[in-house]
Image: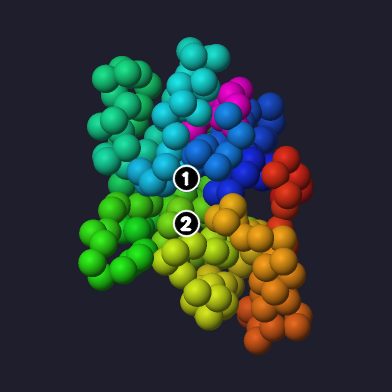
Amino acid sequence: MQLTKKGHACIRLEKEGRTLVIDPGGFSEPDAAVGAEAVLVTHEHPDHFAEDRLRAALEADPETRIWTLDSVARQLTATFPGRVHTVGHGDTFTAAGFEVEVHGELHAVIHPDIPRVTNVGYLLDGSVFHPGDALTVPGRPVDTLMLPVHAPWNKVAEIIDYVREVRPRQAIDIHDGLLSEQARPIYDRMLGPGGPGVAGAEHGRLEPGGSLRL
């Protein structure tokens, strides 16, 4: 499959002429989801869920469908009846030819005084895992981990330990829209050979629009 970074936490996956997009939020391109047969949303925060991005995709193709958790689905079903599917932890389904497993229930803790929202991660074809805003461990081998490197709810020690626990073949940065260019080499070093070690996983990142073959 082909993986393309669409800005911040949004990725686009293409396989056999079919396309699936995860988390086209406010930091991704306005047309990030256009052309996708399926769109998955991990949670309701605006850097992951932007209704205008979803509307652009659904208006462009009447066959486009959305899979997401209840808190997001409730905001969309009236606008897009019959095109929004609600999922939760433990569910499995097929979307755009991808076999999808749903893992996780809650967003990571930002601060004890801030209520936690729901959050799910998606494992695609048993290979690519996008956790949304949580350090969810899917409990099975993962080839490619989409790694939320920088957020108000994490620190680099937690990210290193997360990669060690998941043990992917490679970890590719997401959730990096707030990182300055000066900070990126620091994360590259900490998660690469010069850092404390991430259990042999290769670490990489893509610029918006950058792609790699999986």
Residue pointed to by mark 1:
47
The magenta stretch is: 31-39
Residue 35 spot, x, y in % from top left:
61, 23
Q: Which of the 4 image quarters holds residue 183?
A: bottom right
Residue pointed to by mark 2:
131
At mark 2, the secondary structure is loop
Q: CA distance from mark 2 to mark 1?
A: 14 Å
- In this rendered view, identify the residue nearer to me: 66 or 149: 149
At mark 1, the secondary structure is loop
Identity of the residue furthest to the bottom in this view = 196
Q: Quadrant of the N terminus?
A: top right
Q: Is residue 193 left or right of residue 51?
A: right
| Amino acid identity at mark 2 | Pro
Q: Residue 190 bears which disc, if any? A: none
Residue 118 spot, x, y in % from top left:
29, 52
| Amino acid identity at mark 1 | Asp
Residue 34 forms part of the magenta stretch: yes
Query: Residue at (46%, 44%) from the top-left corner?
Result: 48
The colour style of the image is rainbow
Residue 102 spot, x, y in % from top left:
40, 50
Pointer 2: residues within 10 angstroms few (<14), some, or many (20+)? many
Principal secondary structure, stretch drawn in magenta: loop
Above or below — where is 196 with respect to 102? below
Q: Is residue 175 left or right of residue 187?
A: left
Asked whether residue 165 is in view, the answer is no
- In this rendered view, identify the residue nearer to me: 157 or 181: 181
